[in-house]
Amino acid sequence: MTREPESRQQPRSFDEVVASNERRLLRVAYMLSGNVHSAEDLVQTALIRAYPKWHRIGGLEYPEAYLRRMVVNEFLSWRRRLTNREVPIAEMTETASEDIAGRQAQRDATWRLLATLPRQQRAVLVLRYYEDLPDEEIADVLGCKASTVRSNAARALAGLRAAVPELNEGDST
């Protein structure tokens, strides 16, 4: 007699879920915030809020998805807190030294472009292209409709294209 896998009725422990998902949560938070310290704060705050509710969260089929949603929601709520507003420094390229590796320079330029987007659009791009989530799951994480996800993605990509017009022209330079 073969047994089907049991649905997760026994809640997974908080420590088990955190240990197996902390790095992924930190990567998502870093992609959203662009700062290691802010990413750590986002994840820590989400975990602090999740712990008292763990009896319910741990019993979910995918508690790690719930934690990811908490991290994204925490990031989106930071826009209302004056102490967490970060202003991109436009002069950074002028003060950067010539010995920075090309890869790091490209990563920095990419982050600065992402940082110019509104938080909701940035969250959509991170969840779509970094986490590789379909629009329906992104909508679930953000608490909106899939059509809103698609429009935010389109606006974000249009904004990025406008910020880097040479990408639209191809290699004609």
Image (cartoon, grey):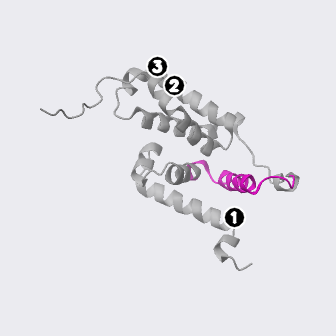
Q: Do the residues labelled 3 and 2 touch (CB within 8 Å)?
A: yes
Residue at image location 69% in from the left, 64% down from the top: 163
State whether residue 160 is above or below residue 121: below
Q: What secondary structure is found at the residue carrying circle 3?
A: helix
Q: Residue 58 at what x, y percent from top left?
A: 39, 26
Q: Which residue matches tag 2?
A: 49
Determine the CA span between mark 1 and mark 2.
37 Å
Tell me the chief SS of the magenta region. Answer: helix
How packed mark 1 is, by other alpha carbons closer than 10 Å (few <14, some 14-19, many 20 or more), is few
Q: In this view, does 108 lie to the left or right of 137?
A: right
**Label at residue 52:** 3
Residue 116 in magenta? Answer: yes
Where is residue 98, by image quadrant? Answer: bottom right
Q: Which residue matches tag 1?
A: 163
Residue at image location 77% in from the left, 54% down from the top: 101
Magenta stretch: give its range: 97-121
